[in-house]
Amino acid sequence: MFMVRSALCGGNGCRIDDTAVVESTVTIARWPLRLLLLAICMGLAAGCGSSVESEDLHADHAGQPVVSSTYVGSQTCATCHASQHAQWSQSHHHLAMAEATPSAVLGDFAGQTLGDTQFRREGAAFLVRAADGTGELADYRVRYAFGVQPLQQYLLELPGGRLQALDKAWDSRPEAHGGQRWVSLQSAEDERLLHWSGPAYNWNHMCADCHSTRVTKGYDGETGAYQTRFAEVSVGCEACHGPASAHVADPVGLRPQALRSGPEQINACAPCHSRRAQLAEGFTPTGNLLDHYLPALLDAGLYHPDGQVLDEVYVYGSFLQSRMHGAGVVCADCHEPHSARLRAEGNALCAQCHNAKGVARFPSLRKADYDSEAHHFHAGSEAASRCVSCHMPESTFMVLDARRDHSFRIPRPDLSVGLGTPNACNHCHEDQSPQWARDAVARWHGPERPFHFGPLIAAARSGDLRAEGQLAALADDTSQPAIVRATALSLMVSFEQRTTTFALQRGLQDADPLVRIGALRGAARWEPRRRFQIARGLLRDPLLAVRIEAARILAEAYPLLTGSDRERLGEGIDEYARSLRLRADRAEGRSSMATIYLHRGDPAAAERELNAALALNPSWVPALVNLADLYRTTGRDQQGGEPLQRALELAPDSADVLLARGLWLVRRQRADDALGLFARAHQLVPARVHYARIYAIALNSAGDPPAALQVLETALNERPRNEELLRLAFTIARDAGMQQETGDYLRRLELRWSP
C-alpha cells in the first residue's frame, strides 16, 4: 500500500499532511483458480496570503450557538488582555510566520552563499538567487520569515499564488552553539528528488494551516492557482479561543471559547501538533478534531514498533500512548498556554506532580522522591539525572531541530535487544550495547519487565501469523491506549483467522473513534460485499473522519450494490470526494479521486484525474501504476509499459510495482522476462498470499511444478489453512501427475477448519 511521504519544510515544523492512506493502492483482485498465467494476470486491478473575514458561531461552554462572530486579530485582544498578549508576543506561536522585515528576518542576507544559493538585500527587499526546477538560477523575493528557533526558513513567491519554503535555512542558535550560519535541510540526492519548488515544500498545502490563523487554501483546480487567505498571519489568540468579534462587542455577556476541560485542551492543540491529514477547513478549538483531521496511527515508517518516534510525527500520537494522558494530564500542565514555555525548568517541572507528597488530582501516582539517585541511578551527572534524559529522548529533524518524545516511556533496552528499537540508555551510552543496558536495568529493577505491545506490533508488521491471537487480545484490551488498539486492528488486514475477525467486528462498534478507524482498515481484508454488510453502519458515524474512512474502505463494493445500499454508499462516497477536493493540489488527492471514478464506472474521468496527478507530481508511483491498469481495462494495454517502467525505476523495491510490471510483460507474451520480477516481489513479501500465488503460477507455467509447490509450501508455513493456496497446490500437483502430493493437499483442504 502506498503512503504519501513528503519532506518537512518549516523552521518549527512545516505540516506534513500525509497521514491518510492513499486510495490509489495497487492491489491484485481475487481471481478464480487458473493455471494459465496469462489468464491470471489479466485480472490485475487498481484499487489501488491576505486576511479574510471568516465567520463562525460564537458558543457558550455548553456548545449552544449564540451569535455569529468574526476574527478580529490578536492586537484587538491586547486592549483588555495585556498580560496574556505580552506572553504570547514572545512565543513561537506569534513568531510562526511574519512579513519579511528587518526585525523579523534573522538570516544574513549580506551577499552570503550556500552552494549555488545566494542571499542578498536590495533596499527593503530580501532576495534569494537559487536554482529552479530545471536547474536554472533565478532571483526570488522573500515574502515571509518562517519560524524562529532553532532555525528560520523563508517563503519565496512563485507564480499562481504559490509560496515555497526554501530548503536552505538560517541556523538561529548562538554562534557558540554552532549557529549563525546557513544550512541545507536536504542532501544533494534529496534535493534532486524533492526540489524546493515542488509540492513537498509548498506552503499553501504543507504549512499554512498551522503557521497562520483560520486559513483557507483557495486552490483552483482548473487553473492550478492559489488564493490562500488567513485571518492572521501567525498563530494568534483566536487560533485557540475562536473568533472574538462578538466578545469585543459584549465583553461580559459573550466570552470567547475557554478550553476548560482536558479533552478540549488536547483537541485544540492536536491539529498542529500531530501527524494528520486535513479533511475539512474551518476548525475551531471547541470543535472535534476528527471532524476536520484524520490522525496517523502507529504506522510503520512513522513509529518504531514499540511506539517510539521514527519519522517527524510531532507530539499527539506519542502523547496518546502515555500513562500521563490516560491519567488526565493535559498540555497546559507543563506548558504555559500563552507563552508556550515550560512552567518550570529542569526536574522541577516533573516534580510538580512526581514527588514524595503527591498531588490530590492524581491519587494513583506513587509518592516518592523521584529526583534522587535511588530513582535515576546516575549520581554526579546532571545531564543523566534529568527526567527527560530517560523518559523523553530526543529525535532530531531538519538537521538540528531536536524534538522530545511525549510518550513519557520507561526505558526498555530489552525491547532494543529483540526489536532493534532505540532506547534512552544507549542514546547516551553509545559505546555500549543494548544488552549491556538491559543487564543494567535488570540489576536495578530485577529481571522481569511488564508487558509491552512492541514485540507484537513488530510481529504483525512482518506478517508473522503466530501473532494473530495475541493481536486480537491486544485490540480487545481496554487498558491499552486507544491508538495502540487501533493500530492492532489496522494490522489485521494481513490476517485471516476467526479470532481477528471477531476482534474486528467488536472494533467497528468501539466507543473510541480511533479504534473504529483502525477496525475499518483491518476490515479491508474482507471481500467488498461482506465488508459493506459488516461496516456500513459507520457511513453514518457522528464523526467525519470515521465516515470518510468508511467510505474509502467500502467504495470498492459500490458497483456490486443495488437499491438503498448503493444509495447509502454513494452518499458516503460523495462526502469522501468533497474532502478530497481540499487536496486537489496534490497528486495523492487526484489519484484517490480517480479511484472513486473507477468504482463508479467512469474510466474517462478517472484517466483525467490520473493525468492531473502526474502533472502535479510526475514521480507519483500510484498514479503511474493505476494509469497503466486503466489502459489495460480500456483496451490500450500496450500503452501501459511506459508508466510501469517509470514506476519500477522510481520504486524498484515495491512488490506491487514489480508484480504489475511482471503481469504486463506476461500479457505482452514475455513471460520469461516476468519471472524474475515475480520472484523479487515474493521475496519482498513472502507472507502475502497473492504474491506467492502469482509466482507459483508463473513457475508452473514455465514447466517447473516442483518449484511452484515449494513456493506455495513456504507460504503455507505461515498460513497452513489458506484455502486459496491449498486449492492451487492441489491443482498443480494433480495436473503434474504427482499423486502423493495431490492426495496430501486434498486431505489438507478437507481438514483446513479443524481445531
Image (tube, rainbow, N blue to C red):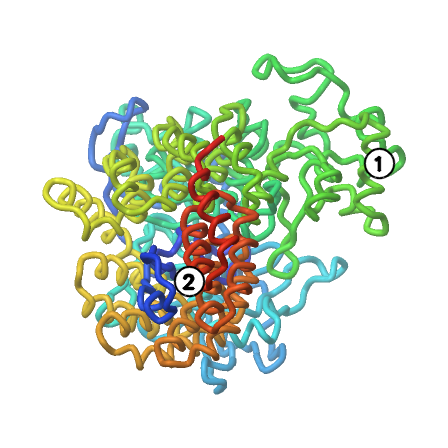
Query: Which of the numbered marks, if any, corresponds to residue 439?
Result: 1
Residue at 53%, 56% (x, y): give it. Answer: 147
Q: Is residue 692 left or right of residue 278?
A: right
Q: What's the CA distance linking mark 2 and mark 1?
A: 57 Å
Residue 735 - label: 2
Evaluate whether residue 100 shows in this view: no
115 over 731 or under it: above or below? below
Circle nearer the viewer, 2 or 1: 2
Q: Looking at the image, can residue 536 be seen?
A: yes
Which residue is drawn at the image coordinates 66% and 34% (left, top)? 409
Mark 2 surroundings: few (<14), some (14-19) or many (≥20) residues within 10 A: few
Dot 1 falls on a residue whose secondary structure is: helix
Q: Residue 216 lies in what quarter of the image?
A: bottom left
Q: Is residue 412 left or right of residue 572?
A: right
Vertical side of 676 occupied by 88: above or below? above
Q: Nearer the viewer, residue 698 or 310?
A: 698
Q: Position of residue 471 (x, y in %)?
A: 52, 35
Instruction: Say which quadrant the N terminus sits in.
Output: bottom left
Q: Residue at x 62, y 43 (%)?
A: 308
Q: Quadrant of residue 490?
A: top left
Instruction: Please name whichever residue, 509 or 190, is drawn nearer the observer in this view of the structure.
Output: 509
Q: Are marks 2 and 1 in contact (CB under 8 Å)?
A: no
Residue at 59 percent of width and 27 percent of height: 323
Q: Residues within 10 Å of mark 1 (few under 14, many from 20)?
A: some
> Which kind of residue does numbered mark 2 sit on?
Asp
Amino acid marked by disc 1: Asp
Tell whether 541 sits left or right of 447: left
